[in-house]
Amino acid sequence: MQKKLIALAVAAVTSGAAFAQSNVTIYGTVDMGYLYRGGNSGAVQNTHSSHSLQGNSAQSSLGFKGVEDLGNGLKALFDLEYRLTPDANSTIGGAGAGHQYVGLTGGFGTAVAGYLDGIRYGIYGKYSPFGNYSVGNFASMTTQYDRAQNAVAYISPSFAGFTAIVAYATNTQATEGGLNAVHVPAITSGGNRGDDQLYSVNLIYANGPLSVDLDYETTRAVGYTDSRLFVATAGASYDFGVVKISGLYDVIKGDRNSLIGGNIDLDSTTAGLQNLGGLAADQKYDRRNWMIGASVPFGKASFLASYGRVKDKTLTEADASKWAVGARYALSKRTTLYADFAHINNDTNAAFTINPMGNNSGTSGGINGFDMGIKHTF
């Protein structure tokens, strides 16, 4: 079972430029384009081609952030982001909230609390040439926590290129006590025994063209009795100038002490349940994911490519691979044209599909995908 995990996106707010601000900054992204999906492979059958107008290369959003100087090197910071669907009649935040937090920063580092971006999800986006959006993203090949509720995190200062993040979520998918009924047997006496708690430790090294991330996370497996998930993720990239090479490797393991009705997987719903199929009650979950990618700049344009595989060591004939190619053209520093194509090859029992949203939100379908459009940031 795949598990969505936690992280932060505070780098921009905690930069020296942000600290110089004395007022609120309004920022955002608007993305709109054409999306095609179709084709069949493995357990994905009888899929009809679909065409839509939507954002593809980024999540449209509107945000407000700011920093207040409290004196003696101490500052307060906040960030409130709201996701948008500009192709539909939605209100601000109608597509859900983005990251939202408040905290303190200074010589000791940065501490924040709120609805925080996922560390593992961020690593996937950092080391994929396509980020976590467009048909080329690799994050949608493994269920992710794009954000976790009820979370706190500490980000250390940088020492010789090293930075550490320690994060904890009291209940990643609901308010405290909100998942009691999901467990077997159901926890009906109230309290927090059913909470899906998450612990994360991320070590980052950045030195010139080299970047490395190591992340370890563990959480209670929602729907299991006294079971946990363990996830280890590593990512690295090196920018040679003429080409940037990147890659990641991911291991997900889980204890299987008790099983709800057979086979489950965790997704972004409150209940967190999704049928997987074919597991015995005493089996341990074991899945490996890896990806390599390249980005080649060429003037105002850049060309992207990636290839990745999902290896399911629990189920048979459930592996899959995905390759993608794409291009970006910068009309300005804030406005970019994009086009991407991706293909998924599923084994007989695998059912991975194209989804331009790496957090698996929205709709997905088919094993071939093409998108093109325009993105503007402000």
Image: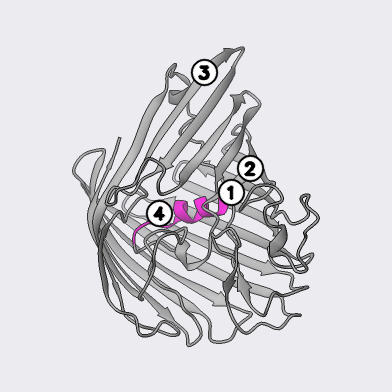
The earlier-in-sequence mark between 3 and 4 is 3
Q: What x and y, as percent, mark residue 96?
A: 45, 47
SS at badge 3: strand
Q: Is residue 124 one of those drawn in magenta?
A: yes
Is residue 328 visible in the rendered image? The answer is: no
* Residue 148: numbered disc: 1
Residue for point 74% across, 57% down:
194
Q: Position of residue 90 (x, y in %)?
A: 34, 47
The reply to whether discs 3 and 4 touch (Cβ–Cβ < 8 Å) is no
Gap between marks 2 and 4 measured at Cα = 23 Å
Given contact means CB atoms under 8 Å apart, are the residues at marks 1 and 2 in contact? Answer: yes
Residue with the mark numbered 4: 131
Q: Residue at x 31, y 80 (%)?
A: 39
Mark 3 or 4: in front is 3
Of the residues shown, which amino acid type is indicated by label 3? Answer: Glu
Name the mark nearer the viewer: 3 or 1.
Answer: 1
Amino acid type assigned to the residue bearing label 2 in the image: Ala
Q: Is residue 97 above or below residue 110?
A: below
Q: Residue at x 56, y 43 (%)?
A: 116
The quarter of the image holding the C terminus is: top left
Q: Secondary structure at mark 2?
A: strand
What crowding class fits label 3: few (fewer than 14 Cα within 10 Å), some (14-19), or many (20 or more)?
some
Q: Which residues are magenta?
A: 119-134
For marks 3 and 1 on the same chain, the one whose residue lies earlier in the sequence: 3
Which residue was labeled with disc 3?
68
* Residue matched to label 2: 151
Judged by depth in the image, the label closer to the viewer, 4 or 1, is 1
The type of residue carrying mark 1 is: Ala
- Name which residue type carries label 4: Gly
